[in-house]
Amino acid sequence: MKFQRHQADEINVNLTPLIDVVFLLLIFFMVSTTFTRETQLEVDLPQADNTAEVSAERPVEVLITAEGEYRVNGQGLVNAQARTLRMALSKAASDNFDLPLTISADARTPHQAVVTAMDVAGGLGFSKLSITTRESE
């Protein structure tokens, strides 16, 4: 008896459909992905001039502590309400709202306290408002 030898067929895996599927998945993810661009507020701050104007008028100074408490010309206020600050600023300016107003705030001061001081000053009619800073090291 003579047996025929079958030659072992070489097993091949066709990679073409696999590559097609990978490319289709790549295209799907590229099309369906949304790219969000994070926007940041850009602020162009003005340069400070080292020469200060000499003014005969004594400016009204508002100091805001780290806890958000106000001091007008060195005098502490009984509370941190806008109404109290309005009365103190009006009294310190003697109803002359053309005087320069300087706001000095601690670096840890809540932002709302500074905004409240600016809002009250603007509501009273102060037009010469400045905020003090320190020179960076």
Image (tube, helix red, strand yellow):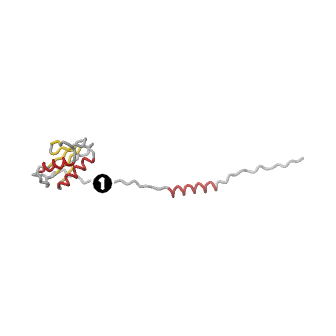
Residue occupying the far right of the picture: 1
In the rendering, at what x and y percent does residue 6 appear? 81, 50
Query: Image point 11% across, 49% down: which residue?
Result: 58
Q: Kindly identify the residue that appears in the image at 33 percent across and 54 percent down.
A: 41
Q: What element carries label 1?
A: loop
- The answer to which image quadrant residue 122 occupies is bottom left
Task: Tell which of 82 and 60 is nearer to you.
Answer: 82
Q: Is residue 121 left or right of residue 22?
A: left
Depth check, front residue: 12 or 41? 41
Is there any visible trace of residue 137 in the rendered image?
no
Amino acid at dot 1: Val
Percent x, y of residue 28: 54, 57
Number of on-image labels: 1
Image coordinates of residue 98 in percent, x first then y, are 13, 55
Q: Which residue is drawn at 82% across and 48% down?
A: 5
Residue behind mark 1: 43
The answer to whether 63 appears left or right of 6 in the picture is left
Examine the rendering and report whether any part of residue 78 can be seen: yes
- Residue 40: x, y in percent? 35, 53
Residue at position x 15%, y 42% from top? 75
